[in-house]
Image (cartoon, helix red, strand yellow):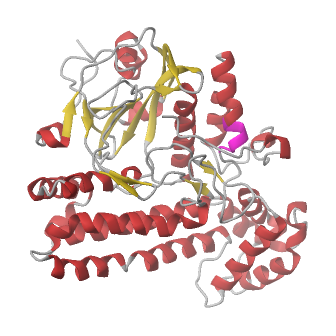
Amino acid sequence: MTSFSLRQTYGQLPEPFHASVALTPVAAPRLVKLNVPLAQSLGLDAGWLAGPEGVAMLSGSAMPEGVHPLALAYAGHQFGQFVPRLGDGRALLLGDVTDSSGQVREIQLKGSGRTAYSRRGDGRAALGPVLREYVVSEAMAALGVPTTRALAAVVTGEQVMRETPLPGAVIARVASSHIRVGTFQFFAARQDRAGLRTLADYAIARHYPDAAHAPAPYLALLERVITAQADLVAQWMLKGFIHGVMNTDNMAVSGETIDYGPCAFMEQYDPTTVFSFIDERGRYAYGNQPSMALWNLTRLAEALLPLLAEDEEQAVPVAQQALATFEPRFQATYLAGLRAKLGLKTARPDDTALFRSLLETMQEAQADFTQTFRALSSEGAVSGEGVPELLAEFGPWLARWRQRLAQEEAQPASDHAAAMRCVNPAYIPRNHLVEAMIKAAVEDEDFSRFEALLAVCTRPYEDQPGMEVYARPAQAEERVRYTFCGT
């Protein structure tokens, strides 16, 4: 008798939404990591998942009775170029569970083999990208950023061919759903209005049930996705996170961060920072992420036009009005986040200039983004007594900041600093540490660096004595210039 059962609600949608998959078993699947707390929150039997049947399922080799995996259909703009049929070329949707909070979550395997959408790909994933996604997605969750979660990582016992042979692996991830902007584009490109409506109804019921009661439900859906994405990208910016491939097929309508490919956390503050090897023109640079999110949302609005009004001429201004809410929402969330990072609870007209001045000073000083805000979160920085050496070049700005703090309700410096440390992390998955972790795992089958980095980065706001090396930026010889998507 199995200890694992799933519903397949997406599978109840018509055939164009998905395709069934013939499993491609792997040679010797072995569990690298099981996220036991996540499994427990999903009501899953962690012991069964870690056993032979569970590992067989997590590798995509064999499914328990009643689990019928699917590959999802979607389209998308990739670096601005539209591809009408992409789909899950190496992913399997296993089905739904309901977590301890009552939220329905999907479990998906990534790297589990070929599907109807694989084209010329092998449908597999290499170990390095699987470990990167595991660490970064779990770190993002700990940072409080909406994200997919990592349930498990499994090595396959087989090699995948990239530039060189690499050990294969599969990641099991959890999301509210895997509906993308590109999913809507898939039906719009086919001029399948019925399919578009079915998808919109499903997304509303799944993510924004209040929209069903709005005077114009499909407009309400668009508005809620815009809000969710504005808030999400603001949180990326506040943490120094760079997604790397903000294609429309990598934007979830749930407002969760999805598809961790060539992602990275910025160290030296510079809005033009790009890590993705394939982003030669800097389309998805750190500072471009808000405008790229709006570009993607505009593509969603275009796809939804047939549902917004009977006549396209009437639908366009409706969509434009909704899209116009993105910038003010993003700015409101971003500025509120900066205030919290600087210990400010009230809003004043000069705050934007104060924030801009700080970022300009950071850029001129080539200061580390995360370390600077953490240093500002010290009692000495707030009081001016015992300012961290890291802030030596910030003297004039620090004086302005303390004058602004004095306009807040009187509090001890220790209280200001404590509140700031709750939003300014000490630890992020720094790129050189991620690469060192991958190198040890791939070349030596040594997962100790993976375990250590994961443990530190899932407690990002805590001071962890003895772990200072994880808070230190890369030295010149350690700096990582490029990251890769892993396909």
Left or right placement of residue 328 versus residue 48 in this view: right
Find residue 447 and report its image quarter.
top right
Question: Please, is residue 279 above or below residue 224 in the view?
Answer: above
What range of the chain is rendered magenta? 429-434
Question: Please, is residue 41 above or below residue 280 in the view?
Answer: above
Left or right placement of residue 201 versus residue 33 in this view: left
Regarding residue 7, the answer to whether it shows in the image is no
Where residue 170 appears, as percent x and y from the top left, is: 45, 25
Left or right placement of residue 162 versus residue 198 in this view: right
Q: Was residue 431 drawn as part of the magenta stretch in this picture?
A: yes
Rendered-image quadrant of the N terminus:
top left
Where residue 439 appears, as percent x and y from the top left, is: 68, 27
The one nearer the camera, 27 or 426, is: 27
Where residue 124 appears, as percent x and y from the top left, is: 43, 25
Residue shown at 67%/64% (left/top)?
420
The one nearer the camera, 459 or 485, is: 485
Regarding residue 451, the answer to whether it shows in the image is yes
Residue at far bottom of view: 349
* Prevailing SS of the magenta stretch: helix
Residue shown at 77%/85% (left/top)?
403
Q: Was residue 280 drawn as part of the magenta stretch in this picture?
A: no
